[in-house]
Image: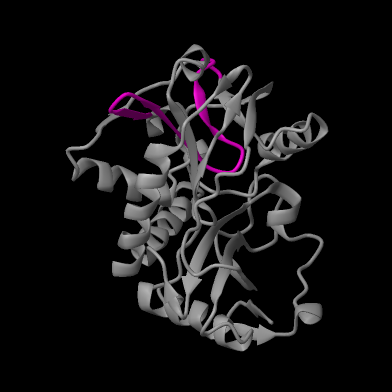
Amino acid sequence: MINLDGNIVQEENASLSVFNRGFAYGDSVFETIRVISGKIMFWEDHYFRLMASMRIMRMEIPSSFSPEFLEEEIKEIIEANDLATSPARIRFAVYRLQGGYYTPATRDIGYVISAEAMENSFYIFNDEPYEIELFKDHYVNSGLLSTIKSNNRAVNVLGSIYARENAYDNCLILNEKKSVVEALNGNIFLVKGKTIKTPPISDGVLNGIIRKQLINILKKTEDYELEEASISPFELQKSDELFITNVAQGIQPVSKYRKKEFENKVAKDLLSKLNVKARLG
């Protein structure tokens, strides 16, 4: 079942026009949301990031788009797919209504919400081998547009193909200044001693939900020192640990980058703290 503009319809009936602006111009933003037994994880952060993304894209935000209304829309599609007592992954996409070419005929929007089952209720630590490499064929630009989740994901798609063709589990993306920005599917953190470093939003980093949660956790602990600063590719092999964060996986430790093999002690510790925070809401 799919929620199409507030109407619950069968997946085969949830059709969009070939002139849809999300398809024609990438004129769309989206959120990937984790729901556990009907409870939306980190809902406030998702809601405000979605609103910020729509404003950056100069979309007209409907007056009905309150946190309560959208929460009910998500819960309704969860129930329609019999996932009310199961872990689920939600994709909430907002697109500008069709009309016009590069210049839209309207700023009004439509939306689609889909749901699929997930295996685990909370984040499970994955210590399987996980090798990464740099993707240097294309770069992301440091700036506001790179911080939102839009349908313009060409670099991520091409990087993912490159990773698969070369038997890597993931790749790191660079910006135009040749600084490490993020992984293909999440934010990157580097551990050196007691210092945990992650690139700043100003480098063109996706404003990740789990990134924000971890930063808040790190600011409240004396075990580690957080540093938000640009990361040079040369720092990667000098670090003790690397790990990737996103809403679907939580924390994914990196085991190998080129000739360097990494530990995963800090990643494991932070994942337990993240699960506690998720349980508490």
Q: Residue reaching furthest top?
A: 234
x, y percent for residue 56: 46, 47
Please tell me whether residue 216 is drawn above or below residue 255 in the rendered image: below
Q: Quadrant of residue 144?
A: top left
Tell me which residue sits at (64%, 86%) in the image: 8
Tell me which residue sits at (36%, 54%) in the image: 272
Number of numbered callouts drawn: 0
Q: Give the colouring mode of the picture.
A: one colour
Tell me which residue sits at (53%, 59%) in the image: 31
Q: Quadrant of residue 259?
A: top right
Give the position of the N terminus as an image quadrant.
bottom right
Q: Is residue 95 left or right of residue 223?
A: right
Give the position of the C terminus as an image quadrant.
bottom left
In depth, the one of 157 and 84 nearer the eye is: 84
Q: Is residue 281 visible?
A: no
Please tell me whether residue 173 is drawn above or below residue 4 in the rendered image: above
Q: Quadrant of residue 63?
A: bottom left
x, y percent for residue 150: 58, 48
| Magenta region includes residue 82 | no
* Magenta region, residue range: 176-197
In depth, the one of 58 and 276 nearer the eye is: 276
x, y percent for residue 22: 68, 55
x, y percent for residue 134: 63, 23
